[in-house]
Amino acid sequence: MWDWDGTLADTMPAHADLAAMCINAHFGMNIPEARESYLKTTGIPFDRQLEKIFPAATAPQ
């Protein structure tokens, strides 16, 4: 059984933690700030979230 939208189980905390670790690894933002930025932009695809959080990011990032 898969529950990607969080209907049956609250999976958002785990997704936010993973996103924060990814943001920290690739952009150097501290984990709490990265998690908050991720949560503020939730609802759009992850690549678009990164564009909103880091509008001046380079292609390698």
Image (cartoon, rainbow, N blue to C red):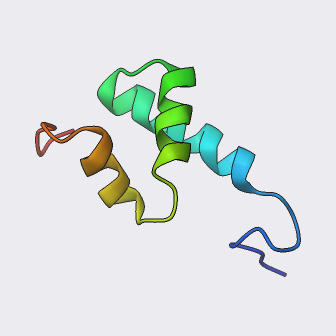
Q: Residue at x 40, y 28 (%)?
A: 25
Comparing 27 with 12, the one in front is 12
Q: Position of residue 21 (x, y in %)?
A: 52, 32
Q: Position of residue 53 (x, y in %)?
A: 32, 40
Corner quadrant of residue 29: top left
Comparing 48 with 26, the one in front is 48
Q: Position of residue 27 (x, y in %)?
A: 31, 28
Q: Position of residue 16 (x, y in %)?
A: 61, 44
Q: Residue at x 55, y 34 (%)?
A: 35
Corner quadrant of residue 2: bottom right
Say whether residue 41 is left or right of residue 52: right
Q: Residue at x 49, y 24 (%)?
A: 33
Residue farthest to the bottom, as pictured: 1
Say whether residue 14 is left or right of residue 27: right
Residue farthest to the right, as pictured: 8
Say whether residue 16 is left or right of residue 25: right
Q: Residue at x 35, y 21 (%)?
A: 28
Looking at the image, residue 56 lies above or below residue 59: above
Residue farthest to the front, as pictured: 40
Say whether residue 44 is left or right of residue 55: right
Looking at the image, residue 29 lies above or below residue 4: above
Dividing the image into 4 quarters, which one contains the N terminus? bottom right
Looking at the image, residue 11 lies above or below residue 26: below
Dividing the image into 4 quarters, which one contains the C terminus? top left
